[in-house]
């Protein structure tokens, strides 16, 4: 929720003082009363006494001289994150919802707690915010204006501070207040103290997604990474700040969450293979001036931010030095070693330099000099030469990392990474999140069993046991890399060749999870992991609906995370179950049902 306010012109004193003109009496008595009011009473020389419990004359005089000033502020509460002031056409709708414009009289001596209580009394909907709001203002012009943050002081927002915002920062002190020119807006934001875990980071990012519009991507499954990046760049009607909606060309599925998740899963996997290189310990961006010139790395950063904020997998494959540069903007040269090098050509050059003798090292002179080494090329300088090659291979990647960091500014993710470096590290560096395994999937299953003791229940339990064996067998075989995005062009392949190629595609536990739910990663937060359930239903009557037939495949609803198993075709033997499920996964990735 947001609200913003307008300082009204009519500031006034809360206490009216009238001044009576009295004739000047230039007597000693009057001068002493005027100079020492606490010592002299009505009669010269008469000391003023006071009763216990009453204030002194000096204190009374200070109170009378102090004037508590008030000014009116018009606040405007809205129901979502906004970069600009609301349109006039939205005012009636907001008023009917208990939001919109309200006028509050603020005293210049009021503190933050008083202002919070006053806002909650005026807008009961703000009670649920628990004080998590911030003021914004818009200055000058007419119509929709850009909102600018009003940072709180150490004591929060006080009446004196609100007054100074308008008088000292927006207008010249000699100008009168204009009710149409100054606005202040409290926006709901998660403060730094609230970011205590990765779940808080994800929740904060999710709240910044603008649900008022959609960011639509329409692609085919072939060459998804290249075409996905191209469509991402060409989308002009909306912004990646909006909710992502994906359409796979030629498929009937409507995106209620699963298509978006599968798109992000495929994009993250493809980006890791296409634009990064390295091992399981961390990867560096590939050195590509062509992709840099096309701003592909900026798009990649935006896709990373959208994936984290909207339910996709995290880009947890960065090397430590890359993440440190993104989070701090600095390169720790002393910490960079040969282990941080991932370019095969550079690794081969280092290996050849180390193995060279005094004569053969001269053969690499041109390659060594191209790395920025300016010393003498000799056997005695091999350590310095290798060090120069190592630093050169990392420093040349900084423009790519800078462009990725530019994309991470989406949802202010980059600022969050810089503020909460240690917490956000697990989103970018390997080791914090486990891969999907058989145990996780089996714990996530929620079968809709028939009544205990019936024949149907026995067949259903048999199918579930087959499923557990199937997952564990895949896990024992070892998870191989997903090569779906590395397929050659299939346009020139015949139907039989395509079918054989698809049939031979390796299936692993992650791919099985993606087939069921659209995602191949374990949910990031503990709460999401606890709520991750896959509903299993059982179909005992396919022969009644379809008559005599030889095969039925499971029906998956990825959006609701549910699957229906045809019992008649899966409960005979384990090999029959394995063949049917493998064929369904291999040929049934498309969203062909609504």
Image: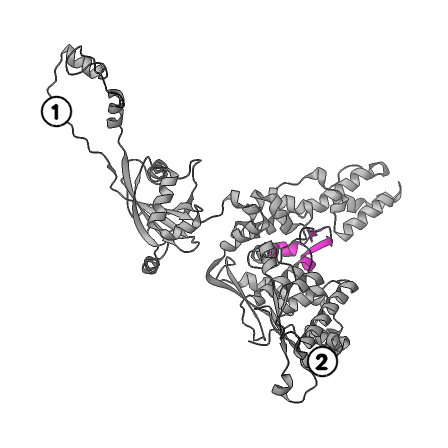
- Nearer the observer: mark 2 or 1; the answer is 1
Q: Residue 306 at x, y = what percent?
A: 56, 57
Tell me where residue 112 sits by quadrant. top left
Please name whichever residue, 61 or 402, is drawn nearer the observer in this view of the structure. Answer: 61
Tell me where residue 297 sits by quadrant. bottom right
Residue at point 58% right, 46% down? 417
Please name whichever residue, 129 or 543, is drawn nearer the observer in this view of the structure. Answer: 543
Q: How packed is label 2: few (under 14 Cα within 10 Å), some, or many (20 or more)?
A: few
Please name whichever residue, 219 or 368, is drawn nearer the observer in this view of the structure. Answer: 219
Q: How is the image coloured?
A: one colour
User: What label sits on residue 21 in the rendered view?
Assistant: 1
Q: Secondary structure at mark 1?
A: loop
Residue at point 76% right, 73% down? 504
Query: In which quadrant of the rendered image does the C terminus lie?
Result: bottom right
Q: Secondary structure at mark 2?
A: helix
Residue furthest bottom in the image: 548
Residue 369 appears in the picture as rendered: yes
Q: Magenta span covers which residues?
A: 272-299
Ranked by sequence position, the earlier of labels 2 and 1 is 1
Residue furthest front in the image: 453
Q: How packed is label 1: few (under 14 Cα within 10 Å), some, or many (20 or more)?
A: few
Q: Mark 2 — residue? A: 495
Q: Residue 197 at x, y = what percent?
A: 58, 48
Count of numbered tags: 2
Q: Residue 157 at x, y = what percent?
A: 39, 39
């Amino acid at each position: 929720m947001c609200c913003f306010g307008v300082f009204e012109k009519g500031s006034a004193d809360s206490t009216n003082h009238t001044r009576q003109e009295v004739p000047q009496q230039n007597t000693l008595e009057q001068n002493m009363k005027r100079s020492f009011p606490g010592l002299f009473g009505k009669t010269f020389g008469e000391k003023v006494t006071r009763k216990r419990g009453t204030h002194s004359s000096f204190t009374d005089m200070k109170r009378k001289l102090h004037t508590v000033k008030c000014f009116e502020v018009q606040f405007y509460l809205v129901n979502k994150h906004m970069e600009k002031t609301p349109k006039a056409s939205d005012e009636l709708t907001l008023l009917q919802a208990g939001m919109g414009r309200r006028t509050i009289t603020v005293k210049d001596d009021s503190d933050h707690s008083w202002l919070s209580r006053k806002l909650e009394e005026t807008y009961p909907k703000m009670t649920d915010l628990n004080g998590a709001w911030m003021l914004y203002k818009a200055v000058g012009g007419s119509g929709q204006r850009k909102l600018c943050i009003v940072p709180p002081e150490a004591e929060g927002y006080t009446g004196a501070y609100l007054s100074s915002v308008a008088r000292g920062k927006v207008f010249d002190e000699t100008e009168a207040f204009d009710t149409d020119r100054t606005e202040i807006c409290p926006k709901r934001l998660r403060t730094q103290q609230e970011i205590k875990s990765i779940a808080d980071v994800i929740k904060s990012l999710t709240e910044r997604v603008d649900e008022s519009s959609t960011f639509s991507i329409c692609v085919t499954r072939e060459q998804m990474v290249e075409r996905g990046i191209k469509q991402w760049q060409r989308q002009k009607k909306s912004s990646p700040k909006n909710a992502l909606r994906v359409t796979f060309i030629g498929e009937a599925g409507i995106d209620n969450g699963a298509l978006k998740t599968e798109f992000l899963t495929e994009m993250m996997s493809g980006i890791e293979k296409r634009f990064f290189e390295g091992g399981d310990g961390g990867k560096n961006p590939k050195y590509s001036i062509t992709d840099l010139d096309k701003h592909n790395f900026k798009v990649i950063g935006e896709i990373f931010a959208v994936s984290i904020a909207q339910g996709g997998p995290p880009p947890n494959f960065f090397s430590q030095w890359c993440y440190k540069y993104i989070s701090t903007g600095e390169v720790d040269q002393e910490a960079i070693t040969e282990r941080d090098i991932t370019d095969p050509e550079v690794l081969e050059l280092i290996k050849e330099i180390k193995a060279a003798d005094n004569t053969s090292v001269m053969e690499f002179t041109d390659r060594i000099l191209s790395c920025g080494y300016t010393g003498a090329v000799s056997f005695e300088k091999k350590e310095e030469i290798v060090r120069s090659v190592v630093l050169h291979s990392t420093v040349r990647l900084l423009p790519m990392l800078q462009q990725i960091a530019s994309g991470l500014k989406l949802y202010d993710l980059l600022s969050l990474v810089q503020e909460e470096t240690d917490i956000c590290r697990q989103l970018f560096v390997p080791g914090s999140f486990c891969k999907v395994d058989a145990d996780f999937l089996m714990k996530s299953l929620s079968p809709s069993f028939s009544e205990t003791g019936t024949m149907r229940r026995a067949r259903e339990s048999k199918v579930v046991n087959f499923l557990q064996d199937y997952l564990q067998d895949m896990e024992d075989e070892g998870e191989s890399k997903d090569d779906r995005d590395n397929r050659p062009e299939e346009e020139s392949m015949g139907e039989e060749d395509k079918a054989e190629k698809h049939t031979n595609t390796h299936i692993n536990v992650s791919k099985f999870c993606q087939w069921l739910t659209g995602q191949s990663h374990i949910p990031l937060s503990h709460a999401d992991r606890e709520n991750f359930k896959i509903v299993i239903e059982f179909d005992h009557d396919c022969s009644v609906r379809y008559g005599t037939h030889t095969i039925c495949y499971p029906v998956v609803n990825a959006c609701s995370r549910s699957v229906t198993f045809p019992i008649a075709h899966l409960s005979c033997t384990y090999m029959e179950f394995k063949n049917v499920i493998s064929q369904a996964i291999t040929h049934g990735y498309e969203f062909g049902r609504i």
